[in-house]
Image (cartoon, grey):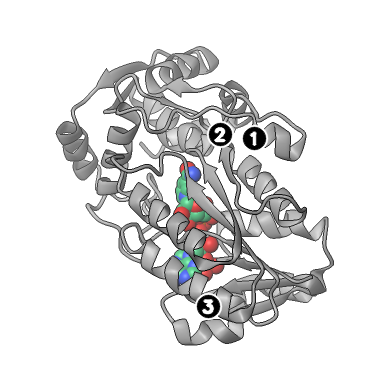
Amino acid sequence: MKTMVSGASGGFGREAVELLLERVAPQDLILVTRNPASLADLAARGAEVRRGDFDRPEELDTAFAGADRMLLISTRDVGRRAEQHAIAIEAATRAGVQHIVYTSSDGSEPGNPAIVAPDHLRTEILLAESGVDYTVMRDSLYAEAAAFMMVPVGLATGQLRMSTGDGRVGFISRSECVAAAVEVLTSDGHSGRTYRIANEQNWSIRELASMAAEIFDRPIEYVELTSEERDSELAAAGVPEHYEVGLETETYGASARDDLVTYEAGIREHYFGTTSRDVRTLTGRGPTPLHEVLVRGRDAVLERSRLF
Ligand SMILES: NC(=O)c1ccc[n+]([C@@H]2O[C@H](COP(=O)([O-])OP(=O)(O)OC[C@H]3O[C@@H](n4cnc5c(N)ncnc54)[C@H](OP(=O)(O)O)[C@@H]3O)[C@@H](O)[C@H]2O)c1
């Protein structure tokens, strides 16, 4: 049984490969990436590293050949991803992949103003129509976004100026999303399932501000903005309006303004507040509470606050 990971050099991909290596032999791993040189260490450990880019369909028959199971990691090209994922799903079907595990998102529902939602929803539909066994992992917003993108602004300025209203988020650590995906990839009984990879409680951003104020012993006030005000403030902070391949700002990573502002609108409209026990059911361990993520990451969070 060969397990393939697409986008294996990203943050999620690398972590998934490390966990997979605890369960499967390196020879049974096919790691597909746009940048094989960056996985030379894993090739040296015995995994098969292949070049594959969803924007180059002609590469994918070779890249996916021989794979039985696939972790399809969503790309970052918001608005264009469904097209990329369709190409990957078609290639996987041609290659005879038996089961695809897909990293979707909480809130992938019609009507969600977040521009990340339609790509995920479309991909879920493509999977259902593909005829291949599949499992959808609807990951909530990573707790690391709270710890390393939101709280540092509050620490630096004394305010969290966002447009999330009283909407709530079931923040979950990326490592717990990875652990759940690896469990599904390496065990049976998950075909056709959609898992809610969320925390067991949720938090508003106002509550996040109070929690961080207490942990770091500094005043942090939540200030509600309109979407237009939030967009202007992010523009003034140098965040580009749209995603382009290679986007990486020091402060907001690969997230562009249209993504951030519409995601906050999605939170405000209560699309991202899912809570769930699926992580506990799948991995045998309850998810880390947000408070603990902040306490454990204390030094790194403080370090990040210097950027804002
Ligand atoms: N739930 C959340 O809070 C949250 C937050 C951020 C992102 N996400 C989603 O989760 C995914 C994984 O997150 P991450 O932290 O690992 O992001 P990341 O480190 O930026 O990785 C981006 C991933 O997209 C892959 N990719 C990009 N363009 C591709 C293409 N043309 N063909 C094939 N693969 C392509 C990359 O693969 P290679 O570079 O190896 O080719 C890599 O695996 C993201 O891509 C995004 O869709 C979720």
Q: Which residue is mark 2?
A: 198
Cβ(mark 3) to ligand 1 < 8 Å? Answer: no
Q: Which residue is mark 3?
A: 91
Q: Which residue is mark 1?
A: 278
Q: Is residue 109 left or right of residue 28?
A: left
Residue 63 location in percent, x, y?
60, 81
Quadrant where the image shows the N terminus: bottom right
Are the residues tagged 1 and 3 within 8 Å (C-beta)? no
Residue 36 location in percent, x, y?
60, 77
Kind of residue at disc 2: Ala
Cβ(mark 2) to ligand 1 < 8 Å? Answer: no
The residues bearing labels 1 and 3 have C-alpha atoms spaced at a distance of 30 Å
- Mark 2 residue element: loop
Q: Residues within 10 Å of mark 2 (few under 14, many from 20)?
A: many
Q: Earlier in the sequence, mark 1 or mark 3?
A: 3
The residues bearing labels 1 and 2 have C-alpha atoms spaced at a distance of 8 Å
Residue 127 location in percent, x, y?
50, 61
Kind of residue at disc 1: Asp
Q: Please name whichever residue, 240 or 277, is drawn nearer the observer in this view of the structure.
A: 277
Residue 176 vertical position relative to residue 79 in the rendered view, above or below: above
Q: Residues within 10 Å of mark 3 (few under 14, many from 20)?
A: many
Are the residues tagged 1 and 2 within 8 Å (C-beta)? yes
Q: Please name whichever residue, 122 or 42, is drawn nearer the observer in this view of the structure.
A: 122
Of labels 2 and 3, the one closer to you: 3
Residue 42, label in figure: none
The image quadrant of residue 271 is: top left
